[in-house]
Image (cartoon, rainbow, N blue to C red):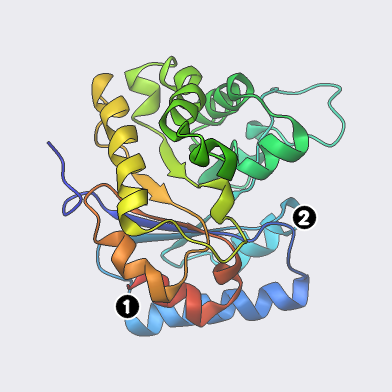
Amino acid sequence: MTTAKTRQRLVIGNWKMNGSLAANEVLLKGIREGVENAGAPVNCTIAVCPSFPYLVQVSQALAGSPISWGAQDVSLQESGAFTGEVSAAMLNDFNCAWALVGHSERRALHGETSEQVALKAKAALAHHITPVVCVGETLQDREQGNTLAVIQAQLAPVLALGEQAVNKMVIAYEPVWAIGTGLTASPEQAQEVHAYIRAQLNAIGAGNVQILYGGSVKAANAGSLFAMNDIDGALVGGAALVAEEFLNITTA
């Protein structure tokens, strides 16, 4: 069985609805120079996910670097009368590597269902984009002892896509109560859920899939999280907007 010591670490920065041409230029320069001056972190893939309007800027700024980039969402539709949507085919035109799907903010603010999340993941895969499938429980779910049941329900439609598809994905566990709140699941709390997800993946022959932790990740807590056997990296929010902090997470 693959272990955390052999699975490559993956750290993705989710910029959310932040940034401008000027601010992005400074941030990308800092991240790129930090990586290139120090050499790429050992056993770590680094990526950033900006808002849609800045994808071209980011792709150009990172061209020829070891840093990849992705989108914060993708449509489950291929094309057509879907105003405001961005298809996987469109993203593929720019060699997009990643697409976040099912982030808790999309589920809560836009009513996305787990079935729709699975269809988005499937659409991304059809265009050779790696979907990063986000799952996570609310504080009420955790307090009622329903964390694992919620995770199972969110994963079920994705796992139903089958071993071949799931092996091409990344899973990100983001407890909703820890996103943007300053609260972070303890390494042990995170590991419990990651181990459960790993068991679900193992059951369909996809145990090698990387599982990231997200939720107020910063350089100060990244090392203790990464030390857990089933935590393979991080989906970073606010800390990804500060080049030095983001780089320190990748090397934690």
Image-based side of 151 in relation to 23, left or right: left
> Which quadrant holds the C terminus?
bottom left
Looking at the image, is mark 1 or mark 2 earlier in the sequence?
1
Q: Residue furthest left?
A: 1
Query: Dividing the image into 4 quarters, which one contains the N terminus?
Result: top left
Mark 2 is on which residue type?
Pro
Mark 1 — residue?
Answer: 39
Task: List x then y, in percent, for residue 207.
Answer: 24, 32
Question: Which percent across, then down, holds residue 94?
Answer: 62, 47
Which residue is label 2 attached to? Answer: 53
Q: Nearer the viewer, residue 156 or 192?
A: 192
Count residues near mark 1 (Cα–Cα under 10 Å), then give few for <14, some for 14-19, many for 20+: few
Secondary structure type for disc 1 = loop
Q: Is residue 235 visible?
A: yes
Q: Position of residue 248 (x, y in %)?
A: 40, 77
Tell me which corner region of the image, top left, top right, bottom left or bottom right, holds residue 152: top left
Can residue 96 be seen in this snapshot? no
Q: Residue furthest front?
A: 144
Q: Is residue 50 left or right of residue 165?
A: right
Picture coordinates of residue 17, whole percent (x, y) = 74, 58
Q: Residue at x 63, y 33 (%)?
A: 88
**Drawn side of residue 132 relative to residue 89, left or right:** left
The amino acid type, in three-letter code, at marker 1 is Gly
Question: Which residue occupies 34% across, 21% down?
Answer: 164
Residue 102 lies, with reference to residue 173, above or below; the image says: above
